[in-house]
Image (tube, helix red, strand yellow):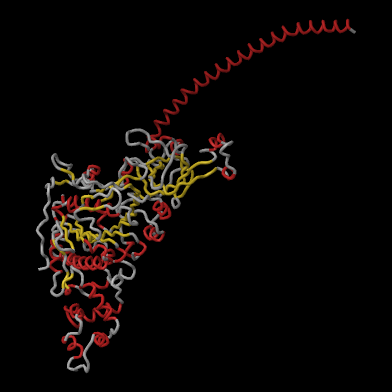
């Protein structure tokens, strides 16, 4: 056994020794064959690649030569399917570079908006402008109205990776299994060759790149074709860009500024009025000027605007900035820098003037009818007659004639005699409250003199501010004066306009500014109020409104529908938001945008003067105007000349004011 084993071991050893060289030789041979085969294949691939590259280059060159000849409607397939060529064409960043894409179009409709899947690392916010290429050399411009977190399938979010053990998995899933999408409401189509923007009627293709809008695109979208424009501020997410509103279109119809208290309505209105006066001061003739009649409830638009709270400061207001183009009237006597005092005689007040005071004075409908009856029976002195403790002999004679009453005549008997036994006393209580006000004088008419001065100033190209001082918190005083002045001035503009059709020049445009507008044009009063009539007549007599309010839902819907351009700041009530955007295209998205507005210096602006809605950071008001020097350029006015100071909020050109300003001589309009 041992010998056989030894022999077998020797044989195996020899066989193994013989086989190893054979295997080594075979392995070496195979490696040489593989190497030669690899070298041959690489040589063939290289030759094939070299042959294909010239062919591809020639084909690419041919396609590039053919594409320009095809025209806008016959682009190469890659360009039509949304390659980066449209992004380079439309995505300029303002410095000549290519703006980064926000994402790709993955779905949507004209009515519900585009669905855009954001690229990794990209973000968007409500109100931001975005654009995407269309076929036929055009671009679509829209607004981001919603931001949504999405997942590819439900399992990813139903069983999310744990924080402690799934960090790598989370990184893998981010922007692949889960991603962020935005809704973009389409508004305008912009042709690359230029031309006027048109309403969006087409959509980009799937996977078309979506980019943030640049300044050139916004300038085309909001072009005023050489007309004056008022800077509105910067669109959200685009702090370096600026949009403007057409000056003429803004004031040719009524406009409104809406927002809850403390959101910056007054500052925004001050900026609009400052731009109006800046533009009007440069007009060649008075008839070319747009002037304002401002009923200043909170003393914001006269000499200065005061801010409350920590760090309170004062802002120069219209009278300081436009001393030569504005007149200031007050309800109080002896106010410095005012041009006159508004005085009302009891003979100036008519029953129609009391109509808008029914709620604030708690007058019944029958009390207003009693006032009309007394005015007809007792003549122009009816107000003073009703203020007396007892009916005068003249009233007794008018009511009883030759018939002598058996008992002394009292006011209840007078009320019963004319058919208003209880309502007459309700009327007398209201009239006594009015007569106790400082600016209401008993006896002779005085209001006509005030109105003549104001009308002369307005039609002479000067704006007028009526400041209420301590009466600003008295809604009855505010409504009485605003209604009386507006109704009579509107009548003068109406007569002037009707005469202009025959021989005279038409009056200049007048914008009446009222606060707490819902008190004047609520549902029960809109048909009788002069302000409701002005809104419904649009610009028929060259008179429009600029209304300021925090409760738009209480304004008559018919009147609100005639407000051409709306500036909407933050609102809390869903009813107020619905009242503003009801009937507007894309109102669902606009509701989302309004709900996301911050409490200061953010506004959604939409309507007649703009081609599409815009959400802006409104300009910050300053006393030197240095941050809004573009106003003069936007308004088409010469640049500021050397040696002149900028006092306007946006750069209104003015001479340096004197170091001390003395109060102008008081004008007694009551005599």
Residue placed most toward the observer, 312 or 527: 312
Q: Residue furthest right?
A: 1
Please identify the residue farthest to the front as the structure is shown: 310
x%, y% of residue 661? 12, 51
Q: Quadrant of residue 266?
A: bottom left
Q: Splitting the image into 4 quarters, where does residue 161 fall?
A: top right
Q: Would residue 612 be visible to someone looking at this image? A: no
Above or below, comparing residue 293 to residue 222 in the picture: below
Q: Say whether residue 430 is left or right of residue 5.
A: left
In this rendering, position of residue 536 left or right of residue 398: right
Residue 570, position as x, y percentages in the image: 36, 54
Identity of the residue drawn at 44% across and 38% down: 122
Residue 190 percent location from the top left of the image: 35, 44
Which quadrant is the N terminus positioned in? top right
Examine the rendered structure and indicate whether residue 408 appears above or below residue 305.
below
Q: How many marks?
A: 0
Residue 144 seen in the current view: yes
Quadrant housing residue 541: bottom left
Query: Toward the viewer: 221 or 45?
Result: 221
> Which residue sits at x=40%, y=61%?
575
Eyeballing the image, is 61 above or below 275? above
The image shows residue 429 at horizontal and vertical percentages of 26, 77
């Amino acid at each position: 056994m041992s010998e056989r084993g030894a022999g077998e071991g020797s044989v195996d050893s020899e066989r193994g020794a013989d086989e190893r060289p054979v295997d080594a030789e075979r392995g070496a041979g195979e490696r040489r064959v593989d190497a030669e085969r690899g070298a041959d294949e690489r040589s063939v691939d290289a030759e094939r690649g070299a042959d294909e590259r010239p062919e591809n280059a020639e084909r690419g060159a041919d396609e590039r030569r053919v594409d320009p000849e095809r025209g806008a409607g016959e682009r190469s397939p890659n360009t039509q399917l949304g390659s980066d060529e449209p992004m380079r064409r439309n995505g300029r960043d303002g410095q000549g570079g290519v703006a980064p894409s926000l994402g790709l179009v993955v779905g949507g409709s004209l009515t519900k908006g585009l669905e855009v899947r954001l690229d990794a690392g990209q973000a968007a916010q409500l109100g931001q402008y975005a654009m995407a290429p269309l076929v036929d050399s055009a671009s679509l411009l829209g607004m981001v109205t919603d931001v949504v977190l999405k997942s590819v399938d439900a399992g990813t979010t139903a069983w999310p990776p744990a924080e402690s053990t799934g960090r790598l998995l989370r990184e893998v899933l981010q922007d692949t299994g889960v991603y962020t999408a935005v809704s973009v409401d389409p508004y305008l189509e912009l042709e690359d060759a230029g031309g006027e923007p048109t309403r969006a009627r087409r959509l980009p293709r799937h996977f078309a790149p979506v980019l943030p809008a640049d300044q050139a695109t916004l300038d085309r979208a909001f072009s005023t074709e050489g007309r004056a424009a008022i800077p509105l501020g910067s669109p959200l997410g685009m702090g370096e860009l600026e949009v403007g509103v057409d000056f003429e279109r803004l004031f040719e119809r009524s406009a409104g500024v809406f927002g809850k208290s403390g959101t910056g309505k007054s500052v925004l209105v001050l900026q609009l009025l400052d731009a109006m006066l800046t533009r009007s001061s440069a007009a060649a003739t008075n008839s070319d000027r747009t002037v304002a009649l401002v009923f200043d409830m909170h003393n914001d638009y006269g000499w200065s605007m005061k801010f409350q709270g920590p760090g309170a400061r004062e802002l120069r207001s219209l009278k300081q900035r436009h001393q030569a183009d504005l007149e200031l009237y007050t309800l109080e006597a002896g106010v410095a820098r005012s041009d006159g005092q508004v005085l009302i005689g009891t003979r100036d007040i008519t029953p129609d003037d009391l109509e808008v005071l029914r709620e604030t004075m708690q007058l019944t409908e029958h009390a207003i009818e009693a006032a009309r009856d007394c005015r007809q029976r007792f003549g122009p002195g009816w107000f003073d007659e009703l203020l007396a403790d007892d009916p005068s002999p003249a009233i007794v004679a008018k009511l009883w004639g030759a018939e002598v009453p058996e008992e002394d005549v009292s006011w209840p008997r007078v009320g019963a005699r004319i058919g208003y036994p209880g309502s007459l006393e309700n009327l007398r209580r209201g009239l006594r409250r009015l007569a106790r006000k400082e600016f209401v004088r008993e006896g002779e008419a005085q209001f006509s003199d005030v109105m003549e001065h104001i009308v002369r100033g307005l039609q002479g190209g000067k704006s007028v501010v009526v400041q209420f001082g301590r009466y600003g918190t008295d809604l009855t005083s505010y409504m009485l004066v605003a209604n009386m002045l507006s109704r009579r001035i509107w009548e003068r503009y109406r007569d002037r306009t009707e005469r202009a059709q025959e021989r005279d020049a038409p009056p200049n445009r007048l914008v009446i500014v009222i606060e707490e507008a819902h008190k004047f044009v609520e549902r029960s009063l809109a048909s009788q109020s002069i302000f409701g009539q002005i809104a419904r007549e649009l610009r028929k007599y060259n008179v429009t409104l600029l209304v300021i309010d925090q409760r738009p839902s209480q304004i008559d819907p018919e009147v609100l529908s005639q407000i051409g351009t709306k500036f909407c700041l933050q609102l809390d009530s869903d009813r107020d938001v619905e009242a503003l955007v009801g009937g507007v295209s894309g109102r669902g998205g606009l509701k989302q945008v309004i709900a996301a507005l911050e409490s200061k210096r953010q506004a959604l602006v939409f309507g007649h003067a703009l081609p599409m809605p815009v959400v802006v950071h409104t300009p910050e008001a300053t006393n030197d105007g240095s941050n809004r020097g573009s106003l003069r350029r936007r308004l088409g006015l010469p640049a500021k000349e050397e040696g002149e100071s900028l006092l306007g909020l946006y750069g209104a050109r003015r001479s340096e004011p004197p170091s001390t300003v003395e109060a102008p001589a008081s004008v007694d309009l009551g005599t």
